[in-house]
Amino acid sequence: MAVVAITGDIGAGKSTVAKLLAEKFRCPLLDADAITAELWRNDENIKALAVLRWGAGILDTSGNIIKSEISRRIFFDPDEYKFCNAILHPVIMRELGVRSERLGVRDLVIEIPLIFEVGRPEFVDEVVYVAADFETRARRCNLQRGWDVGELRRRESFLMPREEKISLSDRVIINDGTLEDLKRNV
């Protein structure tokens, strides 16, 4: 089984590359961010730890985690960021391993944005880094997420340096152009 993990810069197009590769190789796609969202919704232990740490203000009236409230806390304080990663990442990585085993397929694409921050799992055969220049990423983040340049820089300050992640990757795909350019690069 060949497991290819997709990672890269914020706003570089990791999800698009992951989808294109899964389509090209006609294989399943797993997404660490989707698993994270599931955990915030469904894992009562993680919810309880989050409420103990940050209070009931992180919950909506139905008792569900408000993702923006979590982001507001973790992307302003390195200790809160580390705490959040410590409760989520081991569960996410274990779940990715379980799901990849359960699929029982020869080839698999997994989008894992923080693969190097949490440690490359043994079940990953190859890591593809998706890169784009800062201006392109800032424009995309503004259009798709409503972030200004300061917000992008602030969030990136919590991550491992780009150059280090690129050096740890097996391949790099540059996504500064159009979707057609990206399809050719993939």
Image (spheres, rainbow, N blue to C red):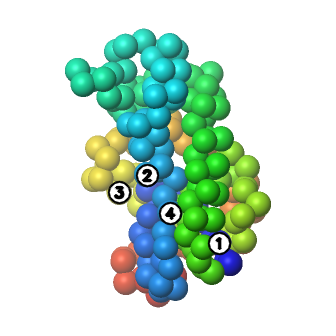
Q: Secondary structure at mark 1?
A: strand
Between discs 3 and 4, the one toward the N terminus: 4
> Tags 4 and 2 in contact by the CB under 8 Å rule?
yes
Q: In 3D space, how far apart are the residues under numbered discs 2 and 3 (Cα atoms)?
A: 20 Å
Say above or below: 32 vs 68. Answer: below
Query: Which residue bears the numbered disc 3?
Result: 140
Q: Badge 1 is on which residue?
A: 3
The mark nearer the N terminus, 1 or 2, is 1
User: Which amino acid is tagged 3?
Assistant: Arg
Residue 11 visible in the picture: yes
Viewer-proximal residue among 151 and 19: 19
Residues 56 and 173: in front is 56
Q: CA distance from mark 1 to mark 4?
A: 10 Å
Q: Is residue 123 left or right of residue 30?
A: right
Residue 152 horizontal side relative to residue 2, left or right: left
Query: What element does badge 3 sit on?
Result: helix
Instruction: Give the labeled residue for mark 4.
Output: 30
In the rendered image, which residue does mark 2 sit on? Answer: 34
Count neighbours of disc 2 (C-alpha within 10 A) and say few if under 14, some if 14 to 19, many if 20 or more: few
Residue type of the residue flagged with mark 4: Leu
Q: If you read the primary sequence from the N terminus, does the residue marked by circle 2 or circle 3 appear first? A: 2
Q: Are marks 1 and 2 in contact (CB under 8 Å)?
A: no
Distance from the alpha carbon under mark 1 to that under mark 2: 18 Å
Residue type, mark 2 in image: Ala
- Looking at the rendered image, the disc whose residue lies closer to the viewer, 3 or 1, is 1
Q: Where on the picture, by quarter, is residue 178?
A: bottom left
Are there few (<14), some (14-19), or many (20+) residues within 10 Å of tag 1?
some
| Of the image marks 1 and 4, the number of the one nearer the N terminus | 1
Return the residue nearer the eye: 182 or 53: 53
Amino acid at dot 1: Val
User: How far from the left and from the top, in percent, is residue 127?
Assistant: 67, 67
Q: Position of residue 17 (x, y in %)?
A: 47, 72
